[in-house]
Amino acid sequence: MSEQDRYGGWFGGNKADKVQDKVQQNIPKASGAEQDRYGGWFGGDKTDRVKDALPQDFPKGSGAEQDRYGRSFGGDKLPNADEISERLPQVSGAEQDRYGRWFGGDKLPSRADIEKRLPKTSGAEQDRYEHWFGGDKLPTRADIERRLPQTSGAEQDRYARWFGGDKAPSTKQLNESLPKVSGAEQDRYGTHFKPGSSSNVTFGSTTSTLGLLQHAVLPSFGFHGGLSVIAYGIGRYTDRIEAKDWLWSSGQVANAWWSAVGGPVVYDGVSVAAAWGALSYSQKLLLAGVSAWGVRLFYRVVSRSIRRGKDNPIYETAAKKEPDFWNKAFFTTFLPEAIMQTLISLPFTLPFRAPVASALASPFPEASAVSQSLAIFLFTAGYALEVLADSQLESHNRKASAELNRDGVWSIVRHPNYLGDALCHLSFPLLLYSAGQLHPITLLGPVANYVFLRFIGGDKENEENREIRYSKENPVKFQELQQYKQSKNSFWPSLSELSNKWLWAVAAAGAGGVVLERSLHGFLRS
């Protein structure tokens, strides 16, 4: 017998039967699960009603968290599982689908609206974010495509119009300006420094120091070295050392034209007209100046040599009378001058042989009209000084005067022709600077020229020879030469020459050259 039957009456007498009936009524009539066993402990007679109501509130779907706890945080106001299912994305579980509307409520655009604004092509940044920074004011993808080059993906094609709006040249114009040969730097960038003109020509280019030596300096030395071999052969055959003087200016002019025009014609297979057309205005101006300087000096040297009919007296030395002189002359006389010519010609060969390196190394890549005018002034003044000095000296020599020539521009300095030569060569790097193509190495040109004129083969050699000759042949001229050396500087004018009218005449010639060049430039651009 169970305890409740054996002791039921011990605690309540005849009331035990009634208690037993109530206890049996309160015991769950279903399973022994916790929810059935304890469901009524917290609500008395409300348990049955709660029990009946609970199944109605439970989700009828799965046992997932969103179904089991969907109503835990909002009471009856929360949507049921069906409403939540309608609002949930019906596609993927990606973040943009699951959280797309969490941050803007119903004000955010729908997925369909977003899809309309998204690019329909690639996922590249320019397609995904093109409208993020300007709203509807930004150009559409179609507008951008119309402005983008339709050819290659090279930088010059992709960004050509980004920096100039509609003023920039079209893709077709850019293609016409680009070289049509190889993809080397000299072909890809050779004509980038002459905007707006079509060209297929470039001749060598490099940007490294070793590359400059290999592709610009050494070929130039080979050019002058080869010419010096020819001059040495002629000089040895005629027994005239002055054969190297014939080569001094003509060799430098020939190297300049070979670098600018001859090389592209031979190696790139273009016509002479195309090679010339590829040059910028500043490059043509540089070639014109070099040619004017070289042709005048070559005519001066050759005409005097022909009239003289023998070697220059300067070279009639004791060393020339030695039996083995010509065996050593190439290495002691001709080859050293080939090296000097290589250095002096750098300002008018390097810009054509290495245009990219020259432009990249230039301190200021943009053209400067002031610097260009100063370069023209120096060149014109120097050229005028050379012409006046030589013509006045020739006029004095024709008179067969026993006196030393100290009139005209010879009253400024003792060697005005050498000063004029130095001014001409100084103008070349300055012209490159104004055009944005001055490589620092080109400054060696005027420096080497100055050193040669002052300390090797110019006024130093000339005066030493004249002192020896005058002391033996013309004592009057020898005395005048000593006085001349005391009163006038050899190369650079002194401050006292500011009152010399010939100095201002030369300066006026330089100013006239600037006016003439500016007028010509304006005419060509009109």
Image: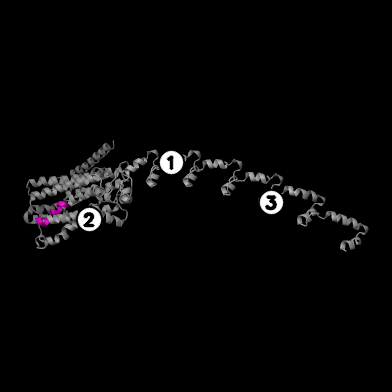
What amino acid is labelled 3 in the image?
A: Arg
Q: Which residue is mark 3?
A: 68
Does 306 lie within the magenta span? no
**Mark 2, residue position:** 221
x, y percentage for residue 188?
A: 33, 48
Which amino acid, mark 1? Glu
Q: Picture quarter containing residue 332?
A: bottom left
Closest to the camera, between mark 1 and mark 2, is 1
Query: What span is in magenta?
Result: 235-247
Q: Is residue 516 left or right of residue 154?
A: left
Q: Amino acid at mark 2?
A: Phe
Q: Earlier in the sequence, mark 1 or mark 2?
A: 1
Q: CA distance from mark 2 to mark 3?
A: 91 Å
Q: Which of the pair 225/430 is nearer the observer? A: 225
Residue 450: % across, % down: 21, 53
Q: Nearer the viewer, residue 40 or 204?
A: 40
User: In the rendering, at what x and y percent does residue 130 appear?
Assistant: 48, 43
Which residue is under mark 1?
145
Residue nearer the viewer, 490 or 348: 348
Mark 1 to mark 2 CA distance (whole Å): 51 Å
Q: Earlier in the sequence, mark 1 or mark 3?
A: 3
State the colouring used for the structure image.
one colour
